Image (tube, coloured by chain):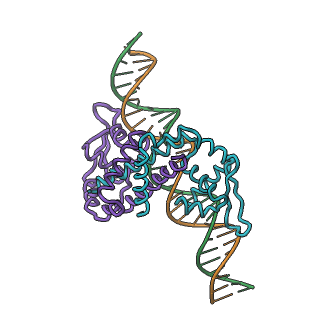
Chain colours: A purple, B cyan, C green, D orange
Amino acid sequence: MDLREISRLLYQIKLAEQNVASSFERETGFSLTRYEMLQVVKERGVCSQRVIKEEMKIDNAAITRHLKILEEKGYVVRERNAENHREMFVRVTEKAEQDLGHCERDERANHLVLQALSAEEIQHLSGLLQKLNSHA
Amino acid sequence: MDLREISRLLYQIKLAEQNVASSFERETGFSLTRYEMLQVVKERGVCSQRVIKEEMKIDNAAITRHLKILEEKGYVVRERNAENHREMFVRVTEKAEQDLGHCERDERANHLVLQALSAEEIQHLSGLLQKLNSHA
DNA sequence: TATCAATCGTTGACTTGTCAAACGATACAA
DNA sequence: TTGTATCGTTTGACAAGTCAACGATTGATA
């Protein structure tokens, strides 16, 4: 297992990321990151950006900018925490719930990965990635 | 297997990509993409940018810019193909061979993935990614 | 042979991530 | 009460990818 083989593997991961991210966006109309972000906020009801950061392991700056876009599109509402004016509280709008539900029911998006991998393979892949990510 | 689960998996891939790419650069001093690019060129001896594009599945614009950086660092030399003035021929320099060899012998970089996954797991992961990528 | 299309590479505008510096709260200590 | 440290967010500068438009060359064809 030399460095060249390792770099090949890592580059495969890079290509996979690019492929799946752009397919996801093409099929659902949502960027993968913003879809995840909406789901994270939706599942919590209301949450601060710090929570999103911890959940998604993404930079603060990226969060601020994605939320700005989501706000412009009418998918989230933000307001300062009255008890702690440093924090911004975020929650999803009715429109977001509707649009998310809509593409959830759309068949196309679900074929994204399922076309390439069986349920077990997906399970396996997820496990390996988790192992890999926890060692970062 | 609903869309939410799929997006979780895809986001895991994204995180993995970010982790491994930055670890690779930290440990080797080479950006993953430029390391791959140097290896591709080195293995071919001399090649046009079109070949790099096909091999690495990366955009033309990115190639031009990476090669510019590699050229500035003295890692590659470029010259027009005398038989076809549209093409640029690229080859790696002596310095590149040396520096690549140097970090190949460096232990740290090799621990990158091996720390997290066994040889079989790596094999398995590679297979799954290949399957996933071929379906893009 | 003159023109028209295809090929190869470059450039500009945009996206999405990073890090670092700055900012307005807040909390705490002297 | 007054610094001072810390927190949560924002902003600016950068990296690396995309796409689309362009420019130069080459090849095909009418």
Residue sitting nearer the eye, A86 or A7: A7
Where, by quadrant of the figure, is residue A23 drawn?
bottom left
Percent from the top left, x then y, of residue B76? 67, 52
Percent from the top left, x then y, of residue B107? 54, 38
In the picture, the quarter occupied by the C terminus of chain A is: top left
Query: What residue is drawn where x is 67% and y is 56%?
Result: B91
Residue sitting nearer the eye, A89 or D18: D18
Task: Tell whether D15 sits left or right of B96.
Answer: left
Is B119 rendered above or below residue A15? Answer: above
Task: Tell whether A11 sits left or right of A98.
Answer: right
Query: What residue is drawn where x is 40% and y is 59%?
Result: B132
Percent from the top left, x then y, of residue B119? 43, 46
Where, by quadrant of the figure, is residue A122 drawn?
bottom left
Is B14 rendered above or below residue A29? Answer: above
Percent from the top left, x then y, of residue C22? 50, 32
Query: What residue is drawn where x is 35% and y is 54%?
Result: A73
Residue sitting nearer the eye, A130 or C10: A130
